[in-house]
Image: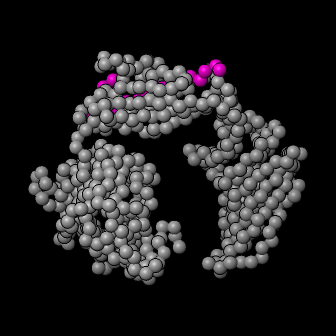
Amino acid sequence: MSADAAPSAGPSAPVFPQGTGGPDDFGYAWNDSMTLNWIDATGGTDTGMSGDSWDQAAGPIYLPFPFKYYENTYNQVYISAAGYLAFTEAGYWDDQDHIPSPGEPNNVIAPYWTPTYIGTRSWVRYLSGGTVPNRYFVVEWHDVKGGAPGDVTGEDDTYRFEVILYENGDIVFQYQTMTFNGSRWCGHTGIEDSEGLDGLSYMDFCELIPSNNAVRFYRPAPSARVSIHPLYQGRFAHVDETVTFEVPIHNTGELGSDTYDLFVSSPWSVGLYVADGATPLADTDFDGTVDTGSVAQGCSTTIVVKVTTPGTANVGDDNSAAIAVRSSLNISKSKTPTLQTAVPAPFAQAFRDDADGAMSLYLVQPAAQAVEKATFDWYYGYDMAVAEMPDSFAYFWNDYNWTGSVGAYEIEYTLLDRYGQTVRGVSKLTNHSWATVNTYDYEPAVAVAPNGRIGVMWYRYLYNSSDYTWNYNMYYAILDAAGNVIVPPTNLTNNPLWGYG
């Protein structure tokens, strides 16, 4: 059963929340002590969605009024079959186990975010109503099922819920009938901002929503605000080196332009500069504190922070520079990014660079750091492992290969010198061109003996798609210091059993 499915335990009892929640960082809060006031959308516009909810959405649909949501204002919305609204078209996942979350999709309003099935007696419709300044826009998921007919998980669950956007920026979730029977797909409820970094859940992931229930999310009153992302940055540094950080500062308030005062706390020397990195920041409003200068509402500025490692620093020494960024319009509104620097001990980190697909090696020394490519771009191996040799590195991974009839993952490797330059080009440790069933070598582990020999261990997964059987075994191999195979890939566990599933 999927991790997103809840096991069967007979009829499940919904959980009633505590009554109020929040605020989140922006200021939204919720209250579910209100009475259900159902708005019937039967006569509204049908989205036309049907069947399984995966990757299904309708839109863009134009709203009857500009809708303020976090620091932005929107005129259109997308309706996902999976129980949420989105203000951007960025994929439509069936569920997400945490709100807020930077994982896509972001910028959502989720009355009940879960896999659904829209059958012959269910629909998703929307309509508008009210008069200025009390207009609303409602979307109703009417008797959608928790699974397709015949699905063990969710087929006997039925949900009738809706979300209402009000002209003043408030949001209401209403649940008329939420029927849960036995096993089900988990759902989540809540709101999150455009980056998925701020938001507010109504109930915990996988908790059941009670019927005849309503919750209102209140938009906060206009206020000064500041947003900084990321709040934490880090760099390695060598003695006497000055490391540069860029800190973007966003005016997400609603009171017009703001000037943000800057307060530094750091044992190591710190300098503050405008975005060019050369011009020091000044006290532009003459209040005795260095500041960003005026930042228009809805706009951003970037400051450059330079942290200098002292000449007396040793390997392992580190520093945290905290830069408090405080609104001049409301001194209670501030953010404090932390910029960390450290003099590192030597190490190497194997990784795949998703920016270019190359198998890469990050080499770190107290005096300098460098990234070297072990393969050409767009190579895309997996399960990287590296071990240090006296003057080089043994670097292993697995790589996918389609043999024409079956799939295979094979163990590959290269040897690099201490500067990341190739000593031995990419070589195959395992070769499955002969395979008659899907043969997958996964998760190599590598170690180097005092005599320079290289030991490698991994597991092999065989899958026969003709009868859906599978087999697991552990394998190992030994190479010399030059990367020549001494002991070829050898089955260590010799498990002859094939499972079925």
Residues 45 and 243: in front is: 243
Q: Relative to 82, is 478 above or below?
A: above
Question: Residue 294 magenta-drawn?
Answer: yes
Residue under the point 24% across and 32% down? 256
Q: Relative to 306, is 451 above or below?
A: below
Please give left or right for residue 36 compared with residue 488 in the image: left
Question: Residue 136 magenta-drawn?
Answer: no
Measuring from the top left, give residue 149's x and y in whole percent: 41, 81
- Over which residues does the magenta segment extend? 293-312
Please give left or right for residue 342 compared with residue 271 in the image: right
| Colour style of the rendered protein structure | one colour
Measuring from the top left, give residue 463's x and y in whole percent: 67, 72
Measuring from the top left, give residue 341's x and y in whole percent: 57, 31
Total numbered badges shown on the rendered structure = 0
Whether residue 34 is visible to the viewer of this picture, yes or no, is yes
Residue extending farthest bottom? 150
Residue under the point 82% across and 48% down? 448
Q: Quadrant of the C terminus?
A: bottom right
Residues 448 and 41: in front is: 448
The main secondary structure of the magenta stretch is strand
Residues 320 and 190: in front is: 320
Q: Relative to 291, is 247 above or below?
A: below
Residue under the point 42% across and 66% down? 206
Please give left or right for residue 328 compared with residue 317 in the image: left
Please give left or right for residue 320 compared with residue 280 in the image: right
User: Quarter of the image holding residue 81?
Assistant: bottom left
Residue extending farthest left? 131
Residue under the point 43% across and 81% down? 10
Measuring from the top left, give residue 334's x and y in whole percent: 36, 34
Whether residue 296 is visible to the viewer of this picture, yes or no, is no
